[in-house]
């Protein structure tokens, strides 16, 4: 059992009292032996063995450390073992140290308890010799390792560790309870050498002497330490095995060789069976009976497989009847002996009665059925039952067991009650555990557990008995602390020893460069590393463990140098001389001039602290100035859009590029029959060829040719119609009187008009092709008929002119003009509404300013701040209503 421990470095690791630190007025010197090489106790041993310590040396060092730290405690009374107390140390097992009166009392009680237990079972009247032997050989055991000691070894005198000096006087210059001389006790293994250490607690270390020792098989000799003289050469053993025929094939080993495993064909003892068996198992017996004839030549041997002669026939010599009462002489061994006819009288298996049947061959009956009076084991019940039956009552034994606490409770107990099987479970003297032994008389054995108390790194540690750890303090460790300082003087700090708790603070001057360029002259106030856990003996629960964190350092004090300070707006030429640690911000009389958020205009307010840059001036933070934002730009955006378009940006003045123009523009096709709607940004971002291609409707041109009345037959295209003089449409050509008519091609009509020197643009549609044919005699007759009915003739001419009269405007153009008129009227209405709205807002702002002044005069700054927030909210709503796309 080991508890995790921690304790501050400042506390002393020695818990000795005044009587431990002073011997007759002489103060005990501090023995500072951080390593085994520096300790005079181990120096003679290490000069021979070397510098590699063994386990025994580490155990001795732990005993010495506990003794020097005042941590030795008696397991029986759990009191500290002082330097002036007489002690006794266990020499056979654990080497634990006890107070001499405590171990004497413990040994007497243990031996008396053994005698008391023996007397319960052995009475001097009935077993005098056994009782006397029990009194003489009442052993006692060590309280810790439970190794038994005879009664004659109950300690009576106080001797040193090696046993040469009785009642050693306390000497501050040697180990406590030691004589200061060489130990000289014989070492383990009976090598003949003696211990080279000074008189010491704990076990003697292994023998360090160098001797010439053979290996296990004896074929090699090597110079080795006496404590490690037994070794294997790892070569074949080659010793002759027990069979006397083969040699051992295993590598050099300790102890006897294994049986020979060579296989061969071997016979059994009787010679009937042959088997392949190992050489070490060549002599064996088969499962068949012997079967050889005996000397009488009438019977065969009934024994199993065996060697040698079978012996004489058992039936030769005197012959008796089956019950043995009558003898017969001169009868052959193979003759059947007759019965005598008397009662058998042979003893039955019960051992009390004899067989009541007549003399008979074969065994008697196994079950004795004679009725007799029997008593149970405890004697409380007597009953007549057949001899083969036993009598058991239901009465529970009330005799106390050897523990003296619990009754036997066994049914029909014969008085020899077994030991108590209950667990003692009484609280031990350590107050931490309960007795795990079976229920017993007398005091419980001390708690055998040891608590390890170590320094924080675990290099220096010792063990104390359970129950005494609350009075112990951690030992001083020679190792340096592993925690690296976090301040800027880590390379200059003096190293300190391993400890619990926080490391000592750095005492050097800070000398850290301040933001102003000067050095700090205070003591180091940098960050402190996380402290080690504090020394505690009770392990905390996992849920409650909180890992300690490092402590951040405090900032340096303000600088006291005189410096030049800029104004809040950081204008050039307005600096003032101020103390570095007490610089009051000020405002100059200049305008702010800071670029607004729109990056297009400048702030027109007076000098003020700017949110973006005025929080830190000359490397120092300003805490007593409230930054003020520059005025907001309320102008509309005046940037030129890319690609260029005639529409203004709908956003207020802003920093980034204007968004693409989403205004829908209408562009008619080249022939004018269809109107296309495009986004302005999309249409203007096209090349000219792409625009011309996008505007084409894909149908016929439908534009009138310049030289004739026909429409262009080409697909909708930009520019003039190609080759209008090559029109191939059929045209009705008439004479002047309109009587004659013929079908000509249009280009022939155009050629005839050009030859007649007529301008094609001046010819109306109704007159196109008229007059190109010469009149004939038929035309005169037709004219006379027309004059007879002039009204009808005039009506025809009017109808033809109406049909030929071209439309002033196409339907699509009329529709577009109608929509444009509606837009103009709606736009005018909107402008009127905006004028009214702006006028109302201006009057509202004037009223607000009046209310603002009244509130300021009545409520002061608090009312002014409230109204300012309200006004900002009203202004935000106004902008949102005016520019809903933002």
Image (tube, rainbow, N blue to C red):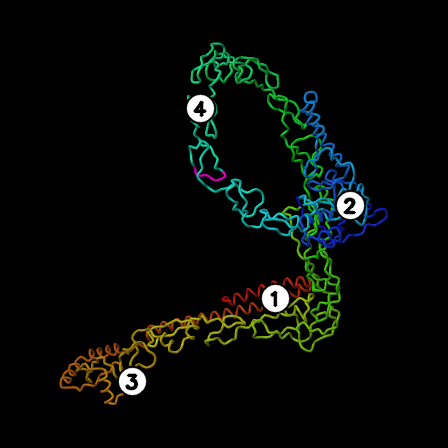
Question: Are the residues flagged by discs 1 and 2 in contact, CB closer than 8 Å?
Answer: no
Give the residue pinned by disc 1: 847
Give the residue pinned by disc 3: 761
The Cα–Cα distance between marks 3 and 2, rounded to whole angstroms, is 147 Å
Q: Image quarter for residue 267?
A: top left
Question: Label 3 crowding class (10 Å Cα cut-off): few <14, some 14-19, many 20+?
Answer: few
What SS does tag 3 mark?
A: helix
Whichever of labels 1 and 3 marks the residue nearer the N terminus, that label is 3
The Cα–Cα distance between marks 3 and 4, rounded to whole angstroms, is 167 Å
Question: Are the residues flagged by discs 1 and 3 in contact, CB closer than 8 Å?
Answer: no
Question: Label 4 crowding class (10 Å Cα cut-off): few <14, some 14-19, many 20+?
Answer: some
Q: Position of residue 756 (x, y in %)?
A: 23, 89
Of badges 3 and 4, nearer the viewer stands 4
Look at the image and tell me in which quarter the N terminus lies.
top right
Q: Which residues are magenta?
A: 275-280
Q: Position of residue 136 (x, y in %)?
A: 72, 29
Whichever of labels 4 and 2 marks the residue nearer the N terminus, that label is 2
Q: Is residue 277 magenta?
A: yes
Q: Position of residue 468 (x, y in %)?
A: 73, 42
Question: Label 2 crowding class (10 Å Cα cut-off): few <14, some 14-19, many 20+?
Answer: many
Question: Label 1 crowding class (10 Å Cα cut-off): few <14, some 14-19, many 20+?
Answer: few
Give the residue pinned by disc 4: 294
Any part of residue 858 in sight: no
């Amino acid at each position: 059992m080991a508890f995790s421990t921690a304790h501050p470095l400042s506390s002393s690791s020695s818990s000795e009292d005044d009587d431990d630190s002073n011997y007759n007025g002489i103060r005990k010197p501090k023995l500072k032996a951080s390593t085994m090489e520096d300790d005079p106790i181990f120096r003679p041993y290490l000069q021979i063995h070397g510098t590699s310590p063994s386990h025994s040396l580490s155990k001795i060092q732990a005993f010495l450390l506990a003794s020097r730290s005042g941590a030795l405690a008696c397991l029986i009374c759990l009191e500290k073992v002082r330097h002036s107390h007489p002690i006794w140390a266990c020499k056979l097992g654990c080497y634990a140290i006890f107070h001499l009166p405590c171990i004497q009392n413990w040994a007497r009680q243990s031996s008396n308890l053994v005698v008391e237990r023996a007397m319960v079972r052995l009475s001097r009247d009935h077993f005098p010799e056994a009782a006397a032997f029990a009194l003489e050989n009442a052993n006692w055991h060590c309280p810790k390792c439970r190794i038994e000691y005879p009664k004659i070894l109950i300690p009576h005198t106080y001797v040193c560790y090696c046993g040469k000096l009785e009642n050693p006087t306390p000497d501050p210059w040697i180990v406590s309870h030691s004589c200061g001389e060489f130990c000289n006790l014989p070492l383990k293994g009976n090598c003949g050498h003696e211990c080279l250490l000074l008189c010491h607690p704990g076990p003697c270390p292994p023998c360090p002497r160098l001797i010439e020792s053979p290996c296990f098989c004896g074929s090699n000799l090597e110079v080795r330490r006496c404590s490690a003289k037994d070794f294997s050469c790892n070569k074949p053993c080659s010793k002759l095995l027990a069979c006397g025929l083969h040699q051992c094939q295993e590598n050099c080993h300790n102890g006897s060789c294994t049986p020979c495993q060579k296989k061969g064909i071997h016979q059994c003892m009787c010679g009937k069976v042959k088997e392949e068996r190992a050489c070490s198992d060549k002599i064996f017996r088969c499962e068949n009976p012997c079967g050889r004839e005996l000397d009488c030549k009438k019977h065969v041997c009934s024994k199993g497989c065996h060697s040698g002669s079978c012996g004489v026939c058992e039936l030769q010599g005197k012959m008796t009847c089956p019950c043995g009462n009558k003898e017969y002489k001169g009868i052959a061994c193979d003759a059947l002996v007759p019965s005598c006819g008397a009662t058998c009288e042979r003893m039955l298996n019960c051992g009390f009665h004899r067989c009541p049947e007549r003399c008979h061959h074969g065994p008697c009956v196994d079950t004795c059925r004679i009725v007799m009076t029997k008593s149970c084991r405890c004697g409380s019940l007597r009953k007549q039952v057949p001899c083969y039956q036993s009598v058991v009552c239901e009465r529970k034994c009330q005799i106390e067991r050897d523990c003296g606490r619990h009754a036997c409770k066994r049914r029909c107990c014969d008085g020899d009650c077994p030991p108590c099987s209950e667990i003692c479970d009484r609280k031990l003297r350590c107050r931490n555990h309960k007795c795990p032994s079976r229920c017993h008389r007398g005091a419980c054995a001390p708690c055998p557990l040891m608590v390890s108390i170590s320094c924080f790194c675990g290099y220096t540690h010792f063990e104390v008995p359970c129950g005494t750890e609350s009075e112990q303090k951690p030992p001083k460790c020679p190792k340096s602390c592993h925690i690296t300082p976090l301040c800027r003087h880590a390379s200059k700090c003096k190293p300190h020893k391993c400890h619990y708790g926080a490391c000592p603070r750095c005492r050097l001057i800070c000398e850290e460069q301040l933001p102003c360029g000067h050095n700090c002259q205070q003591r180091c106030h940098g960050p402190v590393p996380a402290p080690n856990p504090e020394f505690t003996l009770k392990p905390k629960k996992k849920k409650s463990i909180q890992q300690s964190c490092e402590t951040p350092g405090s900032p340096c004090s303000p600088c006291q140098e005189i410096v030049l300070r800029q104004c809040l707006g950081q204008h050039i030429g307005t600096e003032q001389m101020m103390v570095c640690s007490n610089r009051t911000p000020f405002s100059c009389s200049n305008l702010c001039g800071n670029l607004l958020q729109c990056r297009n205009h400048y702030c027109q307010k007076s000098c003020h602290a700017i949110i973006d840059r005025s929080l830190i001036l000359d490397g120092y933070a300003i805490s007593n100035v409230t930054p003020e934002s520059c005025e907001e730009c309320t102008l509309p955006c005046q940037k030129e859009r890319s690609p260029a378009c005639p529409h203004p940006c709908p956003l207020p003045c802003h920093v980034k590029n204007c968004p693409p123009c989403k205004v829908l523009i209408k562009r008619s096709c080249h022939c004018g029959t269809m109107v296309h709607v495009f986004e302005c940004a999309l249409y203007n971002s096209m090349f000219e060829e792409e625009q011309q291609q996008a505007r084409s409707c894909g149908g016929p041109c439908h534009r009138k040719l310049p030289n004739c009345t026909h429409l262009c037959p080409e697909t909708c295209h930009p520019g003039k119609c190609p080759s209008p003089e090559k029109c191939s449409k059929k045209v009705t050509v008439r004479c002047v009187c309109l009587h004659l008519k013929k079908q000509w091609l249009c280009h022939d009509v155009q050629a005839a008009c050009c030859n007649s020197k007529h301008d094609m643009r001046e010819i109306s549609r109704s007159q196109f092709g008229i007059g190109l044919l010469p009149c004939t005699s038929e035309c005169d007759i037709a004219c006379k008929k027309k004059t007879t009915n002039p009204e009808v003739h005039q009506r025809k001419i009017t109808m033809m002119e109406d049909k030929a009269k071209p439309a002033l405007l196409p339907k699509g153009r009329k529709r577009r003009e109608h929509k444009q008129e509606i837009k103009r009227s709606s736009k005018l209405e909107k402008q009127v509404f905006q004028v009214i709205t702006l006028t109302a807002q201006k009057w509202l702002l004037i009223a607000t300013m009046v209310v603002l002044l009244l509130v300021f005069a009545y409520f002061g700054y608090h009312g002014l701040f409230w109204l300012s927030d309200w006004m900002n909210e009203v202004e935000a709503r106004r902008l949102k209503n005016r520019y809903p796309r933002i």
